[in-house]
Amino acid sequence: MTQSDKPRQYAAAGVDLADAESAKERIGRLVAGTRTPLTAGRVGAFGGMVRIPPGMRSPTLVMSTDGVGTKVLVAQQAGRFDTVGECLVNHSVNDILVHGARPLAFMDYIAGAGLGIEMLADIVEGVARGCRAHGMDLAGGETAQMPGLYAHGHFDLAGTIIGVVEEDAALHGDAIVPGDVLLGYASTGLHTNGYTLARKIVAEDLGLELTDEWPGLGQSVADAFLAVHRSYARAVTPVFNRMHALAHITGGGIPGNLVRVLPEGCEAVVETGSWEWPALFRLMQKAGKVSTDEMRDVFNLGVGLIAVLPRDAVPAVEAAATADGVKTWVMGHIESGGRSVRFTP
């Protein structure tokens, strides 16, 4: 028996280096397809490199790391991995977008056990698709097979984004004043938050499988749960200079995220009747007997982003969103008061 014919003990333990090398080659081609004029260095190097855009007076890097939570369990159970990577990118873009930043580069991290080449390629294709949509370099990442830590076929997905903004143009919320308006931007479903509770309601309270149709919605549970987290980059970038703040509505819902951009002495008043919750959220609240307060804390309730801006800026900001196909509506205002978020009855 030659050395190459001997059983591979690492593969027998759960990590196949030959499969890993094949996955690297496919992923490398996807990464190469996202290179931009600002990309430096080589694909497959130990680190990713990206240049700062030329001509900036005081470039400031904006960085964020996040994941897509237990949405990965829905993908794993449905056997569909084509959207969670794009969700990860769009979520991350929105997180730096609220500071007025332009995305430059992204790096992903996939950890799991027994991850097939096709599964990994589908996940990274979603990441690459999201990067290409934003003219952003997928500068690299890591794929780690860790049997013993993860169950076979299970994985987690996270990423780090780097963006840049002129320091004096960054949005911090300090320009917010009483009289400003809250403008809501429609979400595309759950986005990437609240899946632990949503999955419980579907399985235990509604008794539905992922392949079943949501009652009255005309789509399967899997289709609704795996809808891509919307990016708001094209909707808001043209009108950054008209805004005082932006809040990405993720974990913690409207109250937990809107308060993060408020300065001292400003209270955000959200007008409860200014929009109707999408049917998906109303069905989950009824089936799970979830209080309205908890629904507000866990889910986005159809609001993926909130802009805080002067009233006279509303027409221009709404027009920019409409041009990108994103629905918006005035959903409240800023008053003098304690730094908090209040919902009208």
Image: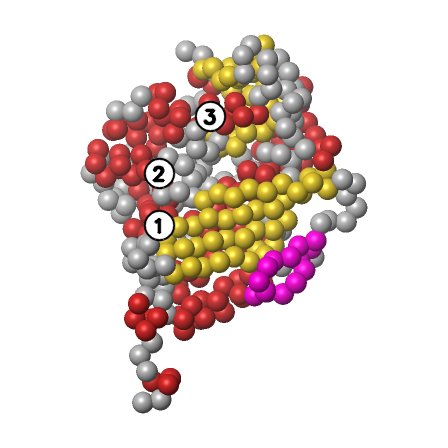
In the image, what residue occupies the spot 38% across and 84% down? 4
Give the mark nearer the N terminus: 3 vs 1: 1
| Residue wearing tag 1 | 75
Q: Nearer the viewer, residue 328 or 135?
A: 135
Q: Indicate the quadrant where residue 308 lies.
A: top right
| Residue wearing tag 2 | 195
Count neighbours of disc 3 (C-alpha within 10 A) and say few if under 14, some if 14 to 19, many if 20 or more. some
Q: Position of residue 214 (x, y in %)?
A: 28, 38
Query: Regarding mark 1 in the picture, which secondary structure is present there?
Result: helix
Give the mark nearer the N terminus: 1 vs 2: 1
Give the CA separation, mark 3 to mark 1: 27 Å
| Residue wearing tag 3 | 256
Magenta residues? Answer: 38-51
Disc 3 + disc 2, Cβ < 8 Å:
no
Confirm whether the magenta stretch covers residue 50.
Answer: yes
In the image, what residue occupies the spot 36% across and 64% down? 116
In the image, what residue occupies the spot 47% across and 53% down? 109
Can see residue 328?
Answer: no
Q: Position of residue 85 (x, y in %)?
A: 46, 51
Query: Regarding mark 2 in the picture, which secondary structure is present there?
Result: helix
Q: Indicate the quadrant where residue 203 lies.
A: top left
Give the mark nearer the N terminus: 3 vs 2: 2
- The relative height of residue 153 versus residue 6 in the rendered view (above or below) is above
The kind of residue tagged 1 is: Ala
